[in-house]
Amino acid sequence: MLWFWWKFASLRSRLKDNIQISNFSPRILLHSQIDKGREVHGVIFKLGFDGDVFIGNTLLAFYGNYGFFGDAIKVFDEMLERDKVSWNNVYGLCSLHGFYEEALGFYRRMVAAIPGVKPDLLTVISVLPVCAESKNEVMARIMHCYVLKVSLFGHVKVGNALVDVYGKFGSQKASSRVFDEKVF
């Protein structure tokens, strides 16, 4: 495994040394980075590292960040092992690309499929905006109850996300109550 990372770092270093930004238009540079990323993905697959959760998460983020949502979901579906980072990545990508119902579907899959993995702070602040955008007030309230149950309410980001989600639902009373009860 160490050998692989050394080779990966070496390849990355050589790419940095050989690419002069001024020599390429941004579109060509982006295409070059995507091609290199796909090439690295192929090497990962050939060397048998595609089962590693860290590498899977990296590939998921790579494809998602370059706008290849379908490829990112394919990587996620083919991952043999998933952790919170995997699930949080896929919620974020779904949200980024406007697939709010799919994001909530992935959240439900995580909760149902993996009893040992519980939603954490990042999960909550990733899922609450999705609830707002999908107009799913029931799920938002479920998340709010979960936040109270596991004592995440003291986090500013959670409080802000709850104020935002209730505000987007037009529930000024609930939004004001959350704001007034926030602990900073």
Image (cartoon, rainbow, N blue to C red):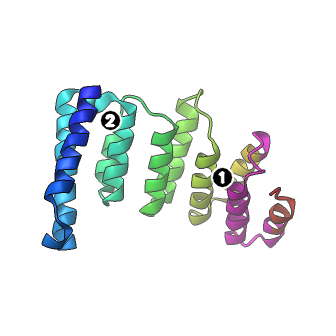
Dot 2 falls on a residue whose secondary structure is helix
Position of residue 174 measured from the top left corner of the image (x, y, whole percent) = 81, 64
- Horizontally, residue 101 falls left or right of residue 80, namely right
Task: Name the residue tied to disc 2.
Answer: 78
Q: What is the magenta segment's predominant secondary structure? A: helix
* Measured Cα–Cα span from mark 1 to mark 2: 27 Å
Position of residue 14 measured from the top left corner of the image (x, y, whole percent) = 17, 49
- First in sequence, mark 1 or 2: give its number: 2
Identify the image quadrant of the C terminus.
Answer: bottom right
Q: Residue at x 52, y 31 (%)?
A: 113
Which of 62 and 102 lies nearest the eye of the viewer?
62
Q: Residue at x 69, y 69 (%)?
A: 169
- The local crowd at label 1, few if under 14, some if 14 to 19, many if 20 or more residues have their Cα within 10 Å, is some
Task: Name the residue tied to disc 1.
Answer: 139
Q: Amino acid at mark 1?
A: Met
Which of 2 and 134 lies nearest the eye of the viewer?
2
Please give the range of residues in magenta.
148-175
